[in-house]
């Protein structure tokens, strides 16, 4: 499967905390932020280009490095907000050139199509994504890659908007089914995850939820 599993022990510790049903809402949301921060760190290290720059110390000029590309972060409401927020904190700290887009999209549970078994219709409330250039890197933050229905809809709209250098999905957990579907329909998209679930029907139950998963990320993050 075309997916990058981040096996850093700290990130895997965070994943275990997020899976735990006894983790309260505040801790769940905070751990999503930690995950977004550290996953963005890993993504930048693997996918971005180091560019040489000059630095003036107290004594003389010397060479340094900065991130070459501008980064567009796209958060999927509502569960993707804390995940993207963690990544934004890192990019702000290193003063990277970046912008943020917001997409409000969710699948319509009662409108599963009769074609592909796990292809749900998507209710797109808003798509607020700033313009980007063909040399930019786009990272879409969504904690759960389940059936891939929502992400595919979002990624198609991004592609319709213009050219980019790389399109990356940052998720906490992905199902084997979702990865296979996304790889088939959009093989150019790069996936980063902390874990891949494959129980039942390639990681999904009959309603299209990831198993074992971590529950409804949005409900757990915002206490409803």
Image: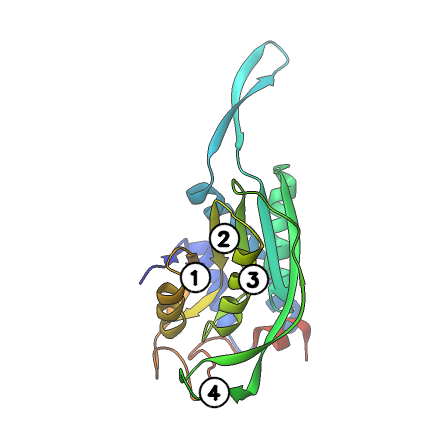
Q: Is residue 35 visible in the rendered structure shown here? A: no
- Observer-side mark, 3 or 2, equals 3
Query: Which numbered disc, 2 or 1, marks the residue that appears first in the sequence?
Result: 2
Tell me whether circle 2 and circle 1 mark residues in contact (CB < 8 Å). yes
Task: Give the position of the N terminus as an image quadrant.
Answer: bottom left
Looking at the picture, tell me which residue is in the foreground, 20 or 143: 143
| Residue 37 appears anywhere in the view | yes
Instruction: Look at the numbered disc 1 and give the secondary structure of its residue.
Output: loop
Q: Find residue 91 and report its horizontal and vertical position in percent.
A: 61, 43
Residue 129 picture quarter: bottom right
Counting residues from the start of the chain, the first of labels 3 and 2 encountered is 2
Q: Mark 3 or mark 1, which has the lower sequence index?
A: 3
**Cα–Cα gap, marks 3 and 2:** 24 Å
Up/down of 196 relative to 11, above or below: below
- Point 46% across, 80% down: residue: 119
**Mark 4–mark 2 distance (CA, rounded to whole Å):** 28 Å
Q: Which residue is mark 4?
A: 207
Residue 170 location in percent, x, y? 50, 58
Helix, strand or loop at disc 4?
Answer: loop
Query: Local crowd at mark 2 within 10 Å, few (<14), some, or many (≥20)?
Result: many
Question: Which residue corresponds to mark 2?
Answer: 39
Which comes before the other along the chain, label 4 or label 2? 2
Residue picked out by circle 3: 157
């Amino acid at each position: 499967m075309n997916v990058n599993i981040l096996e850093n022990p700290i990130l895997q510790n965070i994943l275990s905390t997020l899976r735990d049903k006894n983790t309260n809402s505040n801790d769940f949301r905070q751990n999503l932020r930690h995950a977004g921060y550290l996953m963005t760190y890993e993504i930048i290290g693997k996918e971005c280009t180091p560019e040489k720059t000059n630095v003036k110390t107290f004594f003389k000029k010397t060479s340094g490095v900065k991130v070459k590309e501008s980064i567009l972060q796209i958060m999927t409401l509502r569960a993707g907000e804390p995940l993207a927020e963690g990544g934004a904190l890192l990019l702000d700290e290193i003063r990277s050139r970046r912008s943020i887009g917001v997409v409000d999209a969710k699948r319509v549970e009662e409108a599963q199509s009769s074609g592909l078994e796990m292809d749900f219709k998507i209710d797109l409330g808003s798509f607020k994504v700033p313009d980007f250039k063909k040399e930019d890197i786009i990272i879409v933050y969504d904690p759960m890659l389940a059936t891939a229905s929502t992400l595919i809809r979002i990624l198609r709209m991004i592609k319709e908007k213009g050219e980019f250098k790389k399109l990356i999905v940052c998720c906490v957990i992905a199902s084997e089914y979702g990865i296979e579907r996304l790889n088939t329909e959009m093989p150019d998209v790069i996936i980063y995850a902390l874990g891949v679930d494959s129980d039942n029907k390639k990681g999904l139950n009959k309603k299209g939820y990831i198993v074992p998963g971590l529950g409804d990320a949005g409900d757990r993050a915002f206490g409803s």
